[in-house]
Image: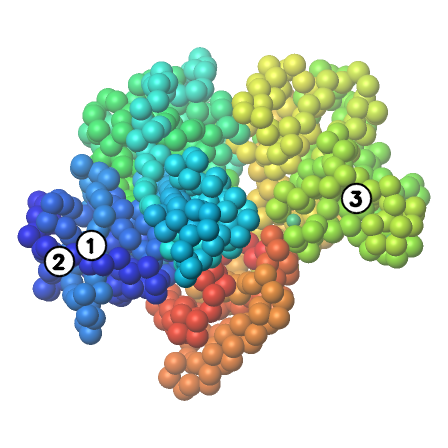
Amino acid sequence: AALSRSCYSHRMAESSSAKLKSGAATESKLPLSPAPNPRLCEVALPVPLPQTFTYSIPPTMTVEPGMRVVAPFGARRLVGVVVGRGQMPAGLNPKAIRPLQRVIDEVPALTAEFIALARWVADYYLTPLGEVLPALLPRAASLRNKTKLLITEAGREALEPGGSGKKLIATSSERQLLERIAKRGGLSSETLRGSAALVEKLRRRGWLAIERSVEDSTARSASAVAPPILTTTFHKGNVPRWELSPPQQTALTRINDQMETGEFGVLLLHGVTGSGKTEVYMRAIELALARGRSALMLVPEINLTPAMAGQFAARFGERIAVLHSGLDDRDRERVWQRVRAGQVGMSDVLIGTRSAVFAPLQRPGLIIVDEEHDGSYKQEEAPRYSGRDVAIVRAKESGATVVLGSATPSVETRYHAETGKYQLLELEGRVQERPLPQTEIIDMRQEFAETGKQTFLSRRMVEAISMRLQQHEQVMILMNRRGFSSFVICRSCGKTVECANCSIALTHHKRAARLLCHYCGYARPVPQVCPECQSEHIYFMGEGSEKVEAALIKHFPEARIGRLDRDTARARGSAESILASFHGHELDILVGTQMIAKGHDIHGVTLVGVISADMGLARPDFRSAEKTFQLLTQVSGRAGRGEREGIVVIQTYYPDHYAIKAAAAHDYAQFYKQEQRFRQLMHYPPFAALANVIVKSDSQEAVLKLTGRLGRFFESLQEDKQKGRGWRVLGPAAAPIPKLKKAYRYHFLIKAEQRSLLRKVLMAAQNFALREKFPANALIIDVDPQSLF
Ligand code: ADP
Ligand code: ZN
Ligand code: ZN
């Protein structure tokens, strides 16, 4: 029902001064407050403030929750979403409430179910609701503010020569600007950005007026020529329908039993690499569809697993819809609308990357999260949510079954399976009794001692590769860093060449002839002399995938060698085509970063080589061992998936590290046991609720001050007998990357015994920052952080 068609005729003069007078700030409230005022509504706006805003509804307007609206906010107009009925905020002058300007949607873009989901995300991750909602809409609903500057009558007079005695006369630069604007009949403020100060002066003098309008980019793109309907961009392979192995059948039966209840439940499908998880997913989806429910499958990166997407397309045809980051706005909108239409037999199986968890799929009965441990499920910018965890919440709301699948479950997930929160399904062997590959560990310290040479290709690695090549088998080589040399150092002054914006050594990219920052994209030409001291003694140190590729070309001139990393995969479709060539055995060796470790099922691969297993271990991050174990296990799992057995060769300087040893032995249980003990002792997840609180500023002095104040606030909380119990704070410390994208960064880690306690502390910190007028965006709260960079 319409929220209101009120006869509220109170019109407000537009106040362009104080920012927060725009709407009226209220604490976020449930949509159905005890005494809702039909003339008011609650609007979430994309501003970094933890509240929603109250607006009045003009009499001519019909507004329902879930509709996008244009609302005045200070001098700006913002696109927000109506999230509920409004209430007169206590103690607020009714006159401070401003009317909505426009309604964008005729039908609500979001249903109550999704508003509730967004509220959960905002609440759990302590992110403004208005910053969460865009993720739930088919595209960023960005209506652009357009401001046009017009010359006023007084402005024209000022241009007149002479004029009367008292009148101000324009100076020549003022005159020039006024004339330019007059001639064009007005100019956009964007065009005049270069003369902003002058414009402001003339505006205050009354010679220029601002005309504001909102340009609807939505309307523009919708009217553009429609592309052919997209079902899937992936070619459909010929896919056999396997007779399930007994363990696969058992797992499927358990999933089916859960779906049969029609109630929410989570199952962990823990199956070693090559155990046939994909077939189980497809059968489970068939069973969900047979019950008249839809299915959602989240995957880490679709373009890196085109073969898998192809299998689904072949099995489900029209029923498959695909959502991933490579789609443009229009295609995304199309998929969105088809999914939302909720037709049985059409787009009722949705495959997508993390944001697909917010797609308006109707009646989901099954939600699969493939490779549930994958770091890409966590969004590392606001809203900082985990697609996996939101999937579970969504399933809970719709009575769906969740299947979390992985060969290397995160410690948290495995822990929940051990303690009975999730059901545990295990596939302990590969299909058709294929063995897991034998693994050799090469101690690179010994290699150096024996050869006296600093090399990154051990003798054993070279030998193993040439043997496979002789037998016309395929090889994958993991080098988990892109570029040629990892840094440039000066032997005279000892300095490395760093990024201008970050405290990060630049990586040398030889083919591009550039030094690049992998964090912000900053690039500079390759220096001939040290930029600090002008010495010629600069050296390129360390290696990346580009250098490994070059070395392999030199060692094996006959071999056909390809490389897959962010550099070679940049162009659209190129990752798919590199993988397709490797699939078709048009390449003998594929070198690459973690991109090559994803679920590829390429039967010709009999050797996987790992150049440096240690890279991730040095990180000051409690997940570094886990990430290393997962990467090594996943990449090893690419070997020996066909008829012939495979082997894995891992080079390392830490052959005794438990993550490396356990990965080499395919021993998840061993790794889990060690890792769990460490987490328990150190109070890390799953034994504590964790948040990373980052303070940042472009000014080093400001960041120190803000960090100090927040630190003292945490201290005062800790000292309180009541409030200080059950949680602790670590820090402040400089963040692992102390300067990132021009901002200086410090951080605190908050560990709490209970989630509710963590929330209390974080909310207190957020309120403190608001009260103390920290600059917007100075405080970043990352709940359940994946990495602490
Ligand atoms: P995982 O995702 O567990 O690593 P996949 O799902 O990629 O494993 O399966 C590995 C291979 O086994 C694939 O080539 C798949 O087609 C095949 N496969 C799956 N189930 C069976 C089965 N029951 N019998 C024989 N082969 C199977
Ligand atoms: Zn120098
Ligand atoms: Zn940088």
Instruction: Report whether residue 391 is seen.
Output: no
Q: Which residue is mark 2?
A: 10
User: Given the current orientation, which residue lies at the most extreme left position?
Assistant: 7
Please, what secondary structure does the residue beneath circle 2 have? loop
Q: Are marks 1 and 2 in contact (CB under 8 Å)?
A: yes
x%, y% of residue 245? Answer: 42, 27
Can you tell which of label 1 and label 2 is closer to the viewer? 2
Left or right: 645, with 217 as reference point: right
Tell me the residue at 39%/81% (across/down): 723
What secondary structure is found at the residue carrying circle 3?
loop
Query: Distance of mark 1 from mark 2, alpha carbons?
Result: 9 Å
Along the line of sight, which residue is nearer the eye, 262 or 759?
A: 759
Do labels 3 and 2 touch, CB within 8 Å?
Answer: no
Q: Earlier in the sequence, mark 3 or mark 2?
A: 2
- Residue 436, placed above or below residue 75: above
Quarter in which the C terminus is drawn: bottom right
Choose the circle earlier in sequence order: 1 or 2: 2
Q: Which residue is mark 3?
A: 542
Q: Amino acid at mark 1?
A: Pro
Say which residue appears at 52% left-offset and 59% top-offset.
676
Mark 2, ligand 3, within 8 Å: the answer is no
Q: Position of residue 141 (x, y in %)?
A: 34, 40
The scheme the figure's colours follow is rainbow
